[in-house]
Image: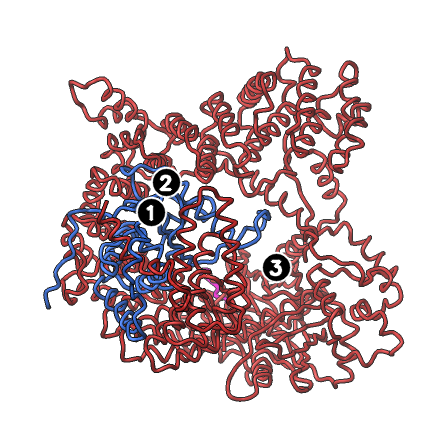
Chain colours: A blue, B red
Amino acid sequence: MIKAILIFNNHGKPRLIRFYQYFHQAAQDTSYCKAEDMQQQIIRETFHLVSKRDDNVCNFLEGGSLIGGSDYKLIYRHYATLYFVFCVDSSESELGILDLIQVFVETLDKCFENVCELDLIFHMDKVHYILQEVVMGGMVLETNMNEIVAQVEVQNRMEKSEGGLSAAPARAVSAVKNMNLPEIPRNINIGDINIKVPSLSPF
Amino acid sequence: MSDVVEKTLTALPSLLSLDSHPGSAKLSSTSKLGNLIRGITELTSKHEEEKLIQHELLAIKEQVSSPNTTMRQMKELMVRSIYCEMLGYEASFSYIHAIKLAQQGTVLEKRVGYLAVSLFLNESHELLLLLVNTVLKDLQSTNLIEVCMALTVVSQMFPKDMIPAILPLVEEKLNHPKEIIRRKAVLALYKFYLIAPNQVQHIHNKFRKALCDKDPGVMTASLHIYLQMIQENPEAYKDLTPSFVTILKQVVGGKLPMDFNYHTVPAPWLQIQLLRILSLLGKNDQSTSEVMYEVLDESLQRAEMNHNITYAILYECVKCIYTIHPKSDLLEKAAKCIGNFVLSPKINLKYLGLKALTYVVQQDPKLALQHQMTIIECLDHPDLIIKRETLELLFRITNGQNVTVIVEKMLEFLCISEDDHTTIDLVGKVAELAEKYPLKYNEWFIETMNTVFSLGGDMMQPDIPNSFLKLLSEGFDSVEEDRKLRLFAVNSYIPLLRGEPGKLPQRFLQVISWVLGEYSHLREDLEPAEVLSLLAKLLDMKNSSSETKSWVLMAMTKLCKGGADASVTQEVSETYSSSLDTVLRQRAHELQYLSQDPELRARVLPRGAKPETLEVDSSLSFLDRFVSEALAAGAAPYKPPHQRQEELDQSKALSLEPYGLSLPISMSSCSITDRQSPTLLSMSSGLSGDTLKLDGIKRVWGREGYLAQREPVEEAAQVEVPSPIQSPGRQGEGDSLHSQTPTQTPTPEPEQEKQQLASSLFVGLASQSSVSLMGKSEPMPQRFRRKAKGQGLGSSFIANEQISSSLISPPSAVDNLLCNNLLDSNNASELAEQTSQLSQSLTTANGTCHAEAELTESDTKGCNPALRRDNCVVAAGPGPHNDPGRLTEVCLDSYLPAELSGLSHSEIAPLCANQSLNLSACHVQKEDSLILVVFIMNSSESAIQQIPAGEVTSYSVAVGQYSLTVKRPAVHVEVVGTVSYQLPAGTSQSLQFSYKVPLTSFIRPFVVSTEEYGTMWLSFSHDTKQNLTLINDNQEPLTATLNALKKKLQLHVVEVIGMEGIVACRLLQDLPCLMHCRVNAGWLAVWLRSPVPDLPDCLIYHCQRALQSL
């Protein structure tokens, strides 16, 4: 089962947090009292563990002490400015999850047309909806990208029918140009170049 | 750069209204998220962020609580709160609004509401209950999207108690025409299974239907459930093996639509899941494994493309092949696969390869040899994770010869590891290895343990120092070796203390002080005074914990001799005898007294005392007299804390006490204690009054007495195990070593080094192919961990107490033994003499109980009065069958004595047999007794002499019957007996048997009136309470359950009043037991009372069993 999915950037700023298990303090640790704090602590520790690893080492990490025990593993991928970390227990296949991350990111790429960190920030809710079609309650629901995209599009259509949300006045362009962004995000590079989405020939 | 900006532009439609007029509500609120985010990105410090977010949260709070806020605005506000929560700022005020949004909004707003709820709340959050109705409504909606949202939120979290409310609706969704709904419903049910397995038990056949669903997606989802259920109980699902194999075959064969392909691999995740299920099913099961060989072979062959996901499948395949019943050619292929993994340049695959090797190496140590050079390389890998995995592998192949090298490697790793979790784990492993092979390398052992203690610090498992000290104190076979080992330990600690002890971890200091206290006298040139002053230095250190200080004081107590040392000890004991810490103060006083009285000290703390096997009277029976005196003096009988607590809780609430009416009203003021022992009214209310609160007090007293005392018993049992320290013989290691290292003639320098390392690491692996060399399967007599506890270790005080206690106590265990011996052997033989040739004696031997069987034998001459025999032995003529070995129950039935034949009897069970006699038995329940009928079958050619019927001629059956009563109840009563007989040749022989009777056979209905019941209830002192499951058939559950119990256990239902029922029964002959049942929140709360100890407990067990078997 997938216990948690964390996405944060190179500076440890969380971009998407989804816990499938409720982590709360062990009895002896009374210094923290809220689950939110525990979750933040897990994020911090995970970031600490993941960020100090080079890009040429393996993508698996045996769980930190917070998320608990040797039964838990962190499986992560690093895309440009973002880390995608899945925390799973021993019932999940390591390589399987690694490719699931790939599927998820490719799906994001399709839905946002060339996804970047900013998409995740400003459309946090949409990313959650996409994730809900991939993983449900900690279980892998769908691994077929086209199917996921189709599901998301059904929802989007519904949204459009409720009236266009984004009618962008032209002068706002200048506003954005003036915006001061300390970390200018690059486009997310979709890892392995040899991966190509197979064309779907009818059966 | 420019396209990045452009991209940013398209991503930020919301920002476009930055300085627009506040006219459009929608735009202004979207822009607020943009504003917030922009604001945050501009910040430079955490503090500023905090301020900004607090400000933001205030604004949100104000808006959400305003009545004018529309649902649409609320949606935007929720997104903003989600954002704040993600950053770690609590927005709890918005939780309730999230629920409201999910409840009242349109589909889009609902979606945000559900998302917010699922992010904000957890399954135990109280607000979640408010969501149940919404979910219920949405599950019934005709809008598919709403149904999907409801299912999603349900699978994320749902209050456990409310599952029954929505379960039928979710179940219904399994038949939904849309596959996505079916799939989500399956996963939601899986979630229910995880949090409340017994609530979905009845729909297991629906899971099967999901497995056979025409849509592969639904089938895939159902595999989650099966993986879990098979993991819990593989036996129950063996019949599904062929189905899983067929599915996998079809998937591998490409029968699925192309949609399911991922990088041209058909449904890889599905394959992985199936392989996992198969490996669980085939584990230790040859016939099941045989079904899957073919498909595994096919999977291995098909998966030869060079992509990540195929490796994932291969890895699962290999693991499966090594888990199920082995097949040689598959193993060969799997081994090759592992090779590919290990040798792969891709680091992820290498990691998995090492994992697979670690898994496999227990069965096939040679495989590690094949890859030894790769393993060596991995040891020096820059990636710590790979390194750790390699160490894990080495740990599994450790033996007596390579242990030093492997431990050295582990310690090297420990020095660079920063992760606490890894450190704890690895320290434990090093300690385990070091303890396994201590004898061979005395000094190495101590040095290794020293490193372990200093590196592991105070994080390590507490049992490591304990078992180390245990090892030191117990020693091995050779006295000289022990002395050397201890001396070496002392020698290594002295310089450490002289150096900078402040840097050492507390645990290490405790170990040091114990060892010095015990063994520093072994080093002759060392003055105790010097050790004392070193120890005293530890006391003065600021960072010494009080636990360490008490260890130090303990050591000083052992060391002080008076004279020159006196000043140091005096000073120390004075300082600490006024300490606020009671333990320290206790130790200081001990030090003070014992240092002044050397004689007493020598007695209390004998030098060089071997740890003795202590007999501990865990039942504390030596206190029996004290207890009975106290009881006689009016003290309340002992009740375990949980029971007391329960009653306290009850007394705080309403008095739900039944039958209280019969008490005079004037006495009701001291209700709690009265209830327990109305005979001891006046005294007890004062003694164990209800003001004593026991929350949070550690539970030291259990049903059997003082719980802590059990540990020493276990320890003692462990100690007796002979310690085979000798590592298995390793002859011929030398030549095998050469044959194993690859012989390359010209080797460059580093290469040579590696080979040297290899030969030292893999030594002893190949010489024997036997698995016994592998670390895991080696016996581990040295490991007492988890048993040894700190207290039992250093302090001889405790030991002394225990010795004395065992001396004083009239041992209850002996009781039991005596009883057995007496009846088993002595009486039997005595009886045999008296009754000439044949006798039978019965006793009961049953761990906890002392059931006594009364033998009644009327016409034996002058026999033991306790053993009366009722109906003598009836000799029957030769049986209808010539082969007595095949005498069936049916024909034994015919030997049942005539007066018993009308009654129901248990199945006739064979007891034991030898070449001449065959014993069977059954029990017959009569109204006021339980008759044990023993059938003695002569299966030999010759007649066997017996009394009183004279003899049992060949191939005939003699029948004896005995009435049994139970003195002290147990769940099962075991009757042990001996048949002594004489063959015609004159040799007397005996045959022993035992027979088990469930307690229920002794239970009879007990007819009383409600008033009588009320009076009896108050006079009984032993009771127990438990919740039982109710039977839910169509009629009234209470009556149904009581009737079922009545039928199964022969109880008498006295009366049923509303939701309560009272039931009575008696244990033969006339030991009553009363039962009070109340329906409470879907459970049957049962309260049993009886004058006989243990009877309520045993009976509740049988009630549970009876209800379970329905």
- Residue position marked by numbered label 3 in the rendering: B845
- Residue A45 location (% of width, % of height): 44, 44
- Residue B716 location (% of width, % of height): 60, 41
- Residue position marked by numbered label 2 in the rendering: A51
Q: Mark 3 lies on which chain?
A: B
- SS at mark 3? loop
Res. B860 in view: no
Residue at image x 50%, y 75%?
B1109
Position of B219 compared to B1028: left or right?
left
Please report the bounds of the magenta region as a residue range: B914-919
Q: Residue A83 carries which label?
A: 1
Q: Which residue lies furthest to the top in this view?
A: B525
Residue B664 position by quadrant: bottom right
Question: Which amino acid is tagged 1?
Answer: Tyr
Whether label 1 touches label 2, CB < 8 Å: yes
Residue B1012 position by quadrant: bottom right
Res. A151 in view: yes
Q: Which chain carries label 1?
A: A
Q: How far apart are marks 1 and 3 (CA)?
A: 66 Å
